[in-house]
Amino acid sequence: MRKIFSAAVILTCFANLAMAQKPDLAHVDKVIKAEDNFNNLVARKGIKAAFLEVADIEGIVFKPNPVKITDFYTNIDKQPGTLTWQPKFARISANGDLAFTAGPYVYQNGKTDDDKVYGDYVSIWRTDENNKLKLLMDLGIQHPEPEQDAITDFQEPDSSKLVAPSKDPFNGKSVILATDKIFNHSLSISTLASYKEFLSPEGRYYFPGFEPMIGQDKVMKFIDNEAITITAETTDAGRSTSNDLAYSYGTARITKGQVVSNYNYVRVWEIDKDHKWDILLEVFSAVEND
């Protein structure tokens, strides 16, 4: 009996140790609540005041080129119209310091349905020194009114993908910068082959004038059908300290048929089960041609 009791104590100790070692993962609801609060701020205080209140100290918007949120909204008059949006796609890093949401928005500066502008937004958030999510990056695309509701995809961090926390945030950034540059170089050789290698199977693609495309097959079919080729240059990047979520952005020149246009791009990167960085989301924001 004493041996059985001792064995039970040992097993309990091991179980408690395993539970103690299990990482305390962040919950995706944290960024959904941040978006809901932002949406409510816009409704109560207006677009300008809301952006200034939620902005990260280094946060940027694309108007059409990247500019600091605080600089842009401080220097404009109160923005007219109403803006509403709804998160439909979201992730958060395991330690909760980096997150994103994306989904449909409606902007209306008038009284009739003809005054409505439809599109999809992408927002990237990171925590400040008080562990509060602040808006780091915001951009969007316009497209015709959607014919059906967007698919909701909120997922919690996957503990099986975690590696040791980064002790050097600058090294973590350099990894994403290098990965983004490798992808851009690959694009100059073969656009389709690059997306086949780097885009996540459930990756999403946001291109102006079109509703978001979901899945590697649909994205590659779109690129092939539209005869798209891309050259791009990395501007900057960042990575969560839990090494499972990252972002990058830069400029791109896209040839679509016989037309060459300039864009800014933002990519969200996610580590896969083999610890390889995949593009989970890519969005292109159009700028004026030269």
Image: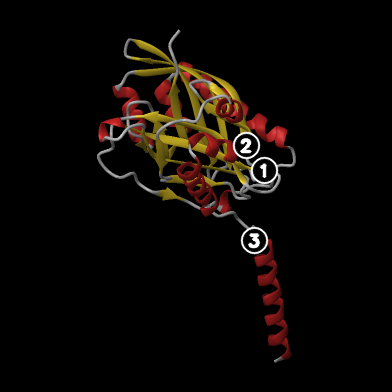
* Image location of residue 188, percent across then percent down: 47, 16
For the point 61% across and 27% down, the residue is 177
**Residue extending farthest top:** 290
Task: Name the one closer to the observer, 94 or 90.
Answer: 90
| Horizontal relation, residue 203 to residue 127: left or right | left
Q: Earlier in the sequence, mark 1 or mark 2?
A: 2
Identify residue for label 2. Answer: 56
- Tell me the amino acid under the disc marked 2: Asp
Q: Earlier in the sequence, mark 3 or mark 1?
A: 3
* Image location of residue 43, percent across then percent down: 45, 44
29 above or below 150? below
Tell me, for residue 22, which label it has, or none. 3
Identify residue for label 1. Answer: 128
For discs 2 and 3, the disc positioned in front in the rendered view:
2
- Tell me if label 1 and label 2 are in contact, CB under 8 Å: yes
| Horizontal relation, residue 156 to residue 256: left or right | right
Classed neighbour count for the residue bearing mark 1: other residues with Cα under 10 Å, few (<14), some (14–19), many (≥20): few
Task: Name the one closer to the observer, 165 or 86.
Answer: 86
Classed neighbour count for the residue bearing mark 3: other residues with Cα under 10 Å, few (<14), some (14–19), many (≥20): few
Q: Dividing the picture into quarters, in which one does residue 289 lie?
A: top left
| Horizontal relation, residue 218 to residue 42: left or right | left
